[in-house]
Image (cartoon, rainbow, N blue to C red):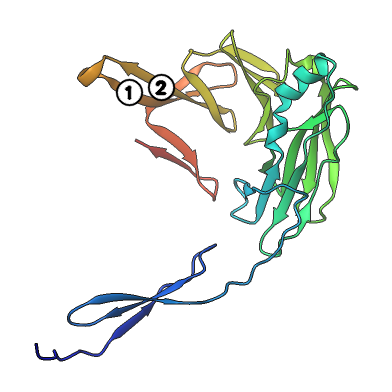
């Protein structure tokens, strides 16, 4: 076979992705597409997270803040159950990591008999729900993203709620709420105080001012006739249905709401 005339190669570099060491050079000619691995050692930064090996982006911070939490110690409700049974509650380590410098902060000191929930971001602060079981208190702590100091934002009695099941901070605005089991009820604990029944397939996921957004799923039929669909139910603070939308609603990084249908 005679040699074929080769056209000049067009080389295109593929940027190195996060956690991907090889960079590939793609070479095009008239007869083949070939890949050539180029060895490039990406600098590795060591982040001292106190043994927490997994962090994730904190929503609404546009990739500036990440957090990691000791999931193996359970959530607030599991810590509450241990305390009621007389078992030790060692506290749950929470770390905040700032990007791109990798600075690490521990906004909630670990103390015996206390446990914290996952953080939320609201108006230049990172808020953390912390339960102090021996003192019978629920604390909302604010970590200032500018001076990196933690302060008590609000405090209420643990008797404000039946238990800590599904108790968590939501936005926006900053809200302490829970979805109750058994009674299929939704409850806002702070800053307002309201409670109303839900349908069995409802799940709260978003607040926007005086509007509360719930996901509701449906299914019917069997086999080839089986059908599943979801919708979004919007309620006011008294639980009255304002609107029901097909599909889902999500909040974008700039605060806008997108309706997906």
Return the disc, 1 or 2, that comes first in the chain's sequence: 2
Q: Residue at x 59, y 21 (%)?
A: 237
Relative height, residue 230 to residue 34 (above, below):
above
**Other-residue count near label 1 (Cα within 10 Å), few / some / many at <14 / 14–19 / ≥20:** few
In the picture of the structure, the residue carrying the numbered disc 2 is: 217
Q: Can residue 190 be seen in this view?
A: no
- Please state the total of marks drawn on the protein image: 2
Classify the position of the N terminus by image quarter: bottom left
Q: Give the quadrant of residue 225.
A: top left
Q: Residue at x 50, y 65 (%)?
A: 20
**Marks 1,2: beta carbons within 8 A:** yes
Classify the position of the C terminus by image quarter: top left
Observer-nearest residue: 237 or 179? Answer: 179
- Residue 68 percent across, percent down from the top left: 69, 45
Q: In this view, does 34 lie to the left or right of 65?
A: left
Q: Is residue 130 left or right of residue 224?
A: right
Q: Give the quadrant of residue 138.
A: top right
- Secondary structure of the residue carrying numbered label 2: strand
Extreme-left residue of the structure = 1
Q: Is residue 160 left or right of residue 187?
A: right
- Residue 106 percent across, percent down from the top left: 80, 47
Q: Residue at x 73, y 49 (%)?
A: 96
- Residue 54 percent across, percent down from the top left: 64, 47
């Amino acid at each position: 076979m005679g040699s074929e005339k080769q056209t000049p190669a067009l080389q295109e570099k593929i940027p190195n992705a996060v956690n991907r060491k090889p960079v590939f050079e793609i070479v095009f000619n008239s007869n083949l597409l070939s890949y050539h691995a180029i060895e490039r050692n990406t600098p590795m930064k060591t982040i001292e997270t106190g043994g927490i090996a997994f962090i994730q982006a904190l929503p609404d911070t546009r990739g500036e803040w990440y957090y990691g939490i000791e999931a193996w110690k359970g959530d607030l409700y599991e810590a509450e159950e241990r305390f009621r049974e007389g078992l030790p509650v060692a506290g749950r380590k929470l770390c905040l990591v700032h990007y791109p410098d990798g600075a690490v902060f521990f906004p909630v000191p670990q103390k015996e008999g206390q446990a914290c929930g996952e953080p939320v971001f609201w108006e230049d602060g990172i808020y953390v729900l912390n339960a102090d079981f021996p003192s019978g208190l629920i604390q909302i702590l604010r970590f200032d993203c500018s001076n990196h100091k933690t302060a008590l934002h609000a405090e209420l009695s643990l008797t404000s709620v039946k238990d800590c099941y599904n108790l968590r901070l939501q936005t926006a605005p900053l809200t302490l709420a829970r979805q109750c089991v058994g009674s299929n009820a939704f409850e806002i604990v702070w800053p307002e105080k309201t409670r109303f029944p839900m349908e069995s397939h409802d799940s709260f996921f978003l607040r926007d001012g005086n509007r509360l957004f719930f996901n509701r799923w449906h299914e019917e039929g069997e086999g080839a006739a089986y059908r599943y669909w979801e919708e979004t139910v919007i309620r006011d603070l008294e639980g009255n249905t304002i609107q029901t939308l097909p599909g889902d609603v999500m909040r974008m990084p700039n605060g806008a709401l997108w309706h997906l249908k």
